[in-house]
């Protein structure tokens, strides 16, 4: 299993970023996919999840209405569109499949820094 996150960077408050996670080594379309984040000195927290097929999504209260999760099963990729970013969104963002053996893997993450 490989999970490769990308798209992070430095952005000003109110800005946007689009994260991508390219997955391999398992049947991507068979698993719900989630995004997590970890801020400095804090526990890793769940951010959003998308079901196996397009349409079923769920979000943490802190990002609902600002973030959108999507997936492309043909490309084995899950995305996180992040709008109206706040300094408290700063952290390392990770993707992970939910359930079964693939859920034991983590990628290297991508750093998001929201600062003026």
Image (tube, rainbow, N blue to C red):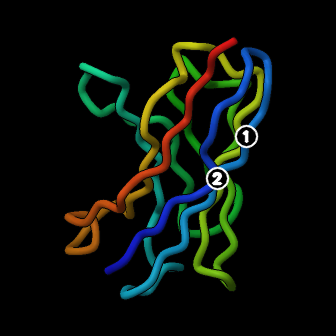
Q: Name the quadrant of the N terminus.
A: bottom left
In contact (CB < 8 Å): disc 2 and disc 1: yes
x and y percentages locating residue 9 in the rendered image: 63, 40
In the depicted view, which residue is nearer to us: 33 or 25? Answer: 25
What is the crowding at mark 2: few (fewer than 14 residues within 10 Å), some, or many (at least 20)?
some
Q: Residue at 41% of width from left, 52% of height from top?
A: 109
x and y percentages locating residue 53 in the rendered image: 63, 69
Task: First in sequence, mark 2 or 1: give its number.
Answer: 2
In the image: residue 21, left or right of residue 106: right
x and y percentages locating residue 3 in the rendered image: 41, 70
Mark 2, secondary structure of its residue: loop
What is the crowding at mark 1: few (fewer than 14 residues within 10 Å), some, or many (at least 20)?
some
- The circle drawn on residue 17 is 1
On the image, numbered disc 2 is attached to which residue?
Answer: 7
Q: In this view, does 98 lie above or below 69?
A: below
Residue 98 falls in which quadrant of the image? bottom left
Q: Residue at 63% of width from left, 16% of height from top?
A: 115
């Amino acid at each position: 299993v490989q999970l490769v996150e990308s798209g992070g960077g430095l952005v000003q408050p109110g800005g946007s970023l689009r994260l991508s996670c390219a997955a391999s080594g398992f049947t991507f379309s068979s698993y719900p996919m989630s995004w997590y984040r970890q801020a400095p000195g804090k526990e890793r927290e769940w951010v959003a999840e998308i079901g196996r097929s397009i349409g079923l999504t769920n979000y943490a209260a802190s990002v609902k209405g600002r973030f959108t999760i999507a997936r492309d099963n043909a490309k084995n990729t899950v995305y996180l569109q992040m709008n109206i970013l706040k300094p408290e969104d700063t952290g390392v963002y990770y993707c992970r499949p939910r359930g079964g053996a693939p859920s034991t893997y983590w990628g290297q993450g991508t750093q998001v820094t929201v600062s003026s």
